[in-house]
Image: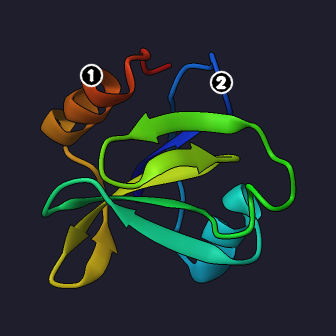
């Protein structure tokens, strides 16, 4: 599964291929996963306790406020996580304001 990963503040988005298991997502963002919807078919997975744990700010979302800690962006299709398309990757890069490496 093709996803974008971003660690906090001033870091580029990293394009990664993962299997997409629950454990994969936990390894990237932490134990308690929170799903932040960005569009109808793109979500951001982050650590639900990141702010409480004192992790740094990652990006600001107009609807949800600051997202803290590392996060993973993935597509959704039929209520399942899916690989990001090139168009979705471009949207996320523009929305976050950082390039993809």
Residue 7 seen by the camera: no
Quarter residue 88 falls in: top left
Q: Which residue is mark 2?
A: 9
Give the image location of residue 29, x and y in percent.
69, 59
Quarter residue 39 falls in: bottom left
**Left or right relative to 29: residue 71:** left
* Placement of the N terminus among the 4 image quadrants: bottom left
Q: Does residue 52 sit above or below 32 in this rendering?
A: above
First of labels 2, 1 by sequence position: 2
Give the image location of residue 42, x and y in percent.
25, 57
Crowdedness of circle 2 by 10 Å Cα count: few (<14), some, many (20+)? few
In the picture as drawn, the residue positioned furthest to the bottom comes out as: 79
Compare residues 76 and 17 and report the one nearer the observer: 76
Give the image location of residue 67, x and y in percent.
55, 48
The residue positioned 45% from the left and 47% from the top of the image is 65
**Left or right relative to 98: residue 72:** right
Inter-mark Cα distance, 2 to 1: 15 Å
Residue 82 seen by the camera: yes
Label 2 residue SS = loop
In the picture as drawn, the residue positioned furthest to the right comes out as: 53
Q: Which residue is mark 1?
A: 94
Compare residues 2 and 60 and report the one nearer the observer: 60
Q: Does residue 96 sit above or below 60 in this rendering?
A: above
Give the image location of residue 56, x and y in percent.
76, 37
For the residues labelled 2 and 1, say whether their Cβ atoms are less than 8 Å apart.
no
């Amino acid at each position: 599964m093709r996803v974008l990963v971003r660690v906090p503040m001033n870091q580029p988005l990293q394009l990664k291929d993962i299997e997409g298991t629950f454990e994969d997502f936990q390894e990237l963002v932490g134990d308690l996963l929170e799903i932040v919807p960005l569009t109808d078919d793109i979500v951001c997975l982050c650590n639900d306790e990141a702010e409480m744990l004192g992790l740094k700010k990652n990006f600001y979302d107009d609807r949800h406020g600051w997202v803290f800690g590392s996060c993973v962006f993935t597509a959704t299709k039929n209520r399942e996580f899916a690989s990001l398309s090139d168009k979705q990757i471009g949207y996320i890069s523009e929305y976050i304001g950082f390039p993809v490496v």
